[in-house]
Amino acid sequence: MNFFQAQDDARKKTLWLAVLFTAAVLSLILLTNLLVAAVYVWTSNYARPEQLNLTGLLTSLPAETWLLITVGVLGVVGVASLYKFLMIRGGGRTVAESLGGRLLTYDSTSSPEEGNSRRLLNVVEEMAIASGMPVPPVYLIPENSINAFAAGFGPDDAVIGVNQGTVELLNRDELQGVIAHEFSHILNGDVSINLRLIAVLHGILFLGMVGYGILRGVGHGRRTSSSGNNSALPILGLAVGLLVIGYAGTFFGNLIKAAVSRQREYLADAAAVQFTRNPDGISGALKKIGGHYEGSEIKSPAAGEASHMFFGQVRTLFLNSLTATHPPLDKRIKAIDPRWDGDFPVVVAGVPTSELAEGASGFAGSPADPDTAAATNTAISAAAIAEINVAADPDQITDAVGSLNDRGLEAARALIDSTDETLKDAAHDPYSARGLIYAILLDENEAQRDRQFSHIQSNAERGVPAHTARLHAHLANMDAPHQLTLVSMAMPALKSLSHPQYKRFISNVIELIKLDRKISLPEWVLHRMLVKELRPHFEGPRRSRPRYGQIDQVAEAAGVLLSTLARFGHDDAAARTAAFKAGAGALELRRASIELDSAEDPNFSRLNEAVRTLSQLKPLAKPKLIKACAATATADGHVSGLEGALLQGIAAALDCPLPPSIYEAAGNTAS
């Protein structure tokens, strides 16, 4: 599916969710009003049951009472939904922790028995880089069934959760299919809808919880009371009625889940096949769910409200064919493998798959022998660190945004395998990851670098300056695509910092950039990536609604962005003018016009404001902007790896992830 169309569909799905929620709330208001009227008539007219009809109920209460009940229901539902939203405001990690998830790190997977978890981290890392996303944190859920989920308000705060049974029972291809399915949900905007759905449905279900609480209170009161009067009967009737309404709300809630999520599962399955080019992977995982005695069931009490997020259905529901959050297992398999014979393999817990011994290196086909692995990495490095170009076709670059395909996967493997092992290890550790980012920011000028390092020694945590000094030597001559890959790989480690550590880290990054009183474009990209990914995790998501449907509405901001790309990517004035005109032409402006801004922007204040404005474009308006950026960069027919990395950084700032498939190796000798 086209990324921009998928994002627009997700936005429309959010509006559809609002319509369904409104309809459900109106139904609850009507039912609650009728319930209160019925209890009132019953208690006031014991001898006249004929009044217990619709006409009698509608005329039994004054308008003020109907209004009071309506406001009360709206208040209860609204407060309950707001409470749940505040509970999940932490994003994906809140969901993972509520399910008992344990954050996986490379340090925690060093023992042989944790080899499968290490393999999982490698697969997630590979998939993230292949899709142009930062690597999300991974949580291991203590369930023996085969299941997984992605959760978050967007790629910035998304996490991947995987059941223990999934990593133990699936081989690498099957695990890769499951993870690709979850990445499709992240890229297509499903995760944001899914989180909001939790808050919305909690409000709908809360009336039933109120009824259950009243029922328990009345029952306890009757047991402790010595009197035999029936004064509690009206309250008991109200409680039972609210409980029934609550069950109706549950039913409606499950219908809403099914309406929102079922078709998205088919789309995510298809995307996983497209990504991996291996239908046997995801179909094999689905078949193992059918053959496993626990299937995809989740026992955690918190799984019910998050059931629509999972790879497989977590439990069977009342009227399951109508209310199931996922399509039937056999239909999902048939959609991927039409020749499937209908047999499910017997899956036994505790029996390892043929690939469980992998994990240490993590990639399919990696040599088991360390010496052979080192030799292979050297060979890959010589080819992949050769001069890197970016595909010079703006349409091709635009089409690559948010794409899941095998070319991206191959490019990600090449980038990861050709990256220095010391640097990769550093990216996976919270202390050395900070040192790695600081080392990337160190200036080429020795005097300026000494000033920066002095600041690190004075302000960084103990041990981090030593990591910075050690890693700086390994970064010599490393190109921008590999540096961006390392930054992406470091995100889970950086997200594991405490809040004070995060504040100190970001403060140090800003100071290292500002010390020479001039910000370079690579420094700007790095800072934007760090703030964009870390701020939602530590400070909560700050998402603005799309406001602009046409590029003409933000022409001035687009002009600032294209001017920056033209100034940076082209040396002489004529080339800059030509590049800017190429980008402006791709915008296809109808009512506005833009001119090249040749003035320097030393602190990138104009660019920051432009990106802030452009990020509020509606999804279907963004392809022209990305194409214009690509046209500006490719105007001279050659785009360096540095310019390509900048395109990736700018696209990421606009919530348009560009995968490394845009890079094309040119030459077979190391630069």
Image (cartoon, rainbow, N blue to C red):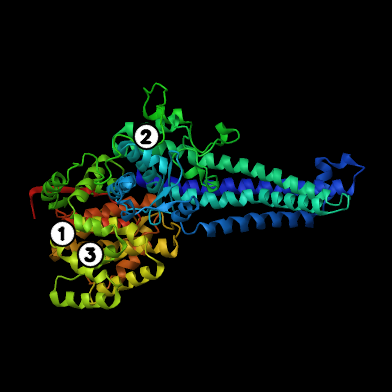
> Dot 3, crowdedness within 10 Å: few (<14), some or many (≥20)?
some
Measured as percent of width and height from the top left, residue 156 is found at 38, 57
Dot 1 amino acid type: Met
As drawn, 308 above or below 444 = above
Measured as percent of width and height from the top left, residue 11 is found at 46, 49
Q: Distance between the residues labelled 1 and 2?
A: 43 Å
Which residue is more in the foreground, 661 or 161?
A: 161
Whichever of callouts 3 and 2 sits on the residue coming sooner in the sequence is: 2
Q: Do the residues labelled 3 and 1 touch (CB within 8 Å)?
A: no
Tag nearer the camera, 1 or 2: 2
Q: Work out whether residue 650 can be spotted.
A: yes
Query: Which residue is depicted at the point 81% across and 54% down?
Result: 224
Query: What quarter of the picture does the C terminus occupy?
Result: bottom left
Q: How far apart are marks 3 and 2 (CA)?
A: 49 Å
Labelled disc at residue 478: 1
Horizontal side of residue 33 vs 379, given as left or right:
right
Dot 3 amino acid type: Pro
Which residue is more in the foreground, 62 or 558?
A: 62
Whichever of callouts 1 and 2 sits on the residue coming sooner in the sequence is: 2
Q: In which quarter of the image is residue 543?
A: bottom left
* Residue pointed to by mark 2: 351
Measured as percent of width and height from the top left, residue 6 is found at 40, 45
